[in-house]
């Protein structure tokens, strides 16, 4: 589950990570009041106005602006709140900005120069270990750094049996080239960051940039946090941070019906039980000349209500030209799924696209008979090849 920058900073701060302080605002008037508070507390003439959306590259799209007085704060907030912010990670449609973060200016002058770094903590699935990935090239897209200057990216593997060791945190600080007071601050920063990552059951913490200020403080200027949805039952306070307005509406609806759904760009809707079978079904569609419009796993206990909810979600996609239902009857009986398809079809009414229904497993023959005798626009199949041929047929008829 992705969360906003200001929420990520709240979590980091609770674990002792130094962050760029800020106050979230929904209106220009709230932004002005937030700026007043920040200027009182931090004695800076400048504040930063930052759009809060679930995407990176906000500055490139005009979603991050400096303001030197209250008039500029109000104008910047007015410009950003309500804008459709397009970044390299949003796609051409962009995302609507409904709130902003009014943040303190941490790039203040001093005795020595400031320096930006990149630090992230994530899971290396191949090795089964957490890693700290870091670079001296903060403030840039890490993909560009990896492509053009890969020698400037460092990785520190963490043994899960012992956790982050002191010498590893010191190694990170050394490789980043900080010394003196900044070295000690970086060690504390890395240690607290890793503690936050582990304690929150996160799948990724990405801080870009991490700033060494002119007076040798180390601060998280940004925070991109992804929480493991499977562990949210242990963290109801973090689960409450979910912002469904930032998610695909179809995926939100599917989640409410306990369906595992990912929206794609194809023309054949999928309704399958089991993640592995769903992936195989997507391969079948590709081999048949189509493109999967979604990943949809209805689970092992599919019934009429589940099937109806899945139909409603798939049919909201105007690109869908056919629907392939692929069910293996292990826990669930195929004839019950077939009856669920028939009941859902009749309850929804006229479904404008053909349906290929492949049921295999317990009571598969009875299920095929139910489908064939239903009188509905549903093609039944038992073998995978048969289902693939039917996908090819219905797509060709609509070409």
Image (cartoon, rainbow, N blue to C red):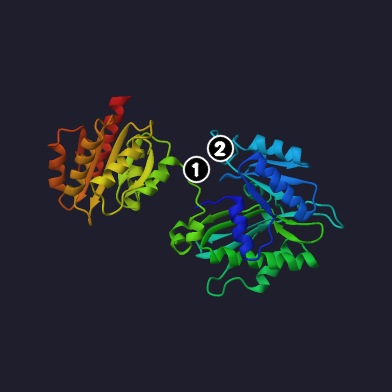
Q: Which is nearer the eye, 157 or 262?
A: 262
Q: Marks 1 and 2, how far apart in space?
A: 9 Å
Looking at the image, which residue is at 77% across and 64% down? 182
Q: Can you give x and y, in whole percent of width and height, for residue 4 in the image?
A: 57, 50
Q: Quadrant of residue 184?
A: bottom right
Q: Can you give x and y, in whole percent of width and height, for residue 129 in the image?
A: 53, 65
Query: Which residue has dot 1 on it?
Result: 245
Q: Disc 1 on helix, strand or loop?
A: helix
Q: Is residue 341 left or right of residue 253?
A: left
Quadrant (top left/top right/bottom left/bottom right) for the C terminus: top left
Query: Which residue has dot 2 on it?
Result: 96
Q: Disc 2 on helix, strand or loop?
A: strand
Q: Visible in this render: residue 260?
A: no
Looking at the image, which residue is at 23% across and 40% down? 344
Disc sitting over residue 381 in the figure: none
Q: Visible in this render: residue 90?
A: yes
Count neighbours of disc 1 (C-alpha within 10 A) and say few if under 14, some if 14 to 19, many if 20 or more.
Answer: few
Q: Which is nearer the eye, 188 or 138?
A: 188
In this rendering, the answer to whether 381 lies above or below 273 is: above
Q: Is residue 393 left or right of residue 71?
A: left
Q: Can you give x and y, in whole percent of width and height, for residue 187 in the image?
A: 70, 67
Query: Are dots 1 and 2 in contact, CB under 8 Å?
Result: yes
**Residue extending farthest right:** 111
Looking at the image, which residue is at 76% across and 61% down? 217
Mark 1 vs mark 2: which is more N-terminal? 2
């Amino acid at each position: 589950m992705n969360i906003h920058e200001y929420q990520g900073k709240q979590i980091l701060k609770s674990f002792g990570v130094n962050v760029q302080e800020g106050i979230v605002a929904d209106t220009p008037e709230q932004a002005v009041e937030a700026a007043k508070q920040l200027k009182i507390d931090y004695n800076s003439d400048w504040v930063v106005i930052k759009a809060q959306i679930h995407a990176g590259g906000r500055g490139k799209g005009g979603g991050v602006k400096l303001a030197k007085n209250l008039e500029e704060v109000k104008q910047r907030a007015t410009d950003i709140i309500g804008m459709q912010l397009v970044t390299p990670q949003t796609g051409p449609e962009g995302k609507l900005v409904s709130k902003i973060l009014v943040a303190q200016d941490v790039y203040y002058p001093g005795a020595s120069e400031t320096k930006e770094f990149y630090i992230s903590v994530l899971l290396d699935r191949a090795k089964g270990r957490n890693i700290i990935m870091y670079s001296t090239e903060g403030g840039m897209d890490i993909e560009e750094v990896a492509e053009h200057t890969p020698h400037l990216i460092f990785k520190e593997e963490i043994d899960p049996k012992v956790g982050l060791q002191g010498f590893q945190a010191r190694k990170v600080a050394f490789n980043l080239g900080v010394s003196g007071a900044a070295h000690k601050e970086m060690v504390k920063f890395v240690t607290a960051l890793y503690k936050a990552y582990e304690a929150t059951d996160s799948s990724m913490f990405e801080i870009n940039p991490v700033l060494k200020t002119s007076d040798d403080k180390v601060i998280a200027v940004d925070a991109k946090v992804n929480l493991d949805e499977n562990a949210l039952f242990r963290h109801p306070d973090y689960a409450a941070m979910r912002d469904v307005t930032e998610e695909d509406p179809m995926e939100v609806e599917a989640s409410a019906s306990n369906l595992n759904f990912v929206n794609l760009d194809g023309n054949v809707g999928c309704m399958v039980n089991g993640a592995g079978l769903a992936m195989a079904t997507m391969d079948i569609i590709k081999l048949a000349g189509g493109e999967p419009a979604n990943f949809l796993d209805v689970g092992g206990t599919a019934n009429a209500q589940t099937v109806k909810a899945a139909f409603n979600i798939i049919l909201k996609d105007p690109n869908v030209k056919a629907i392939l239902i692929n069910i293996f009857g292990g826990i669930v009986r195929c004839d019950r799924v077939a009856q669920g398809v028939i009941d859902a079809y009749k309850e929804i009414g006229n479904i404008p696209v053909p349906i290929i229904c492949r049921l295999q497993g317990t009571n598969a023959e009875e299920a095929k008979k139910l489908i064939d005798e239903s009188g509905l626009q549903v093609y039944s199949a038992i073998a995978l090849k048969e289902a693939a041929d039917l996908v090819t047929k219905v797509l060709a008829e609509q070409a």
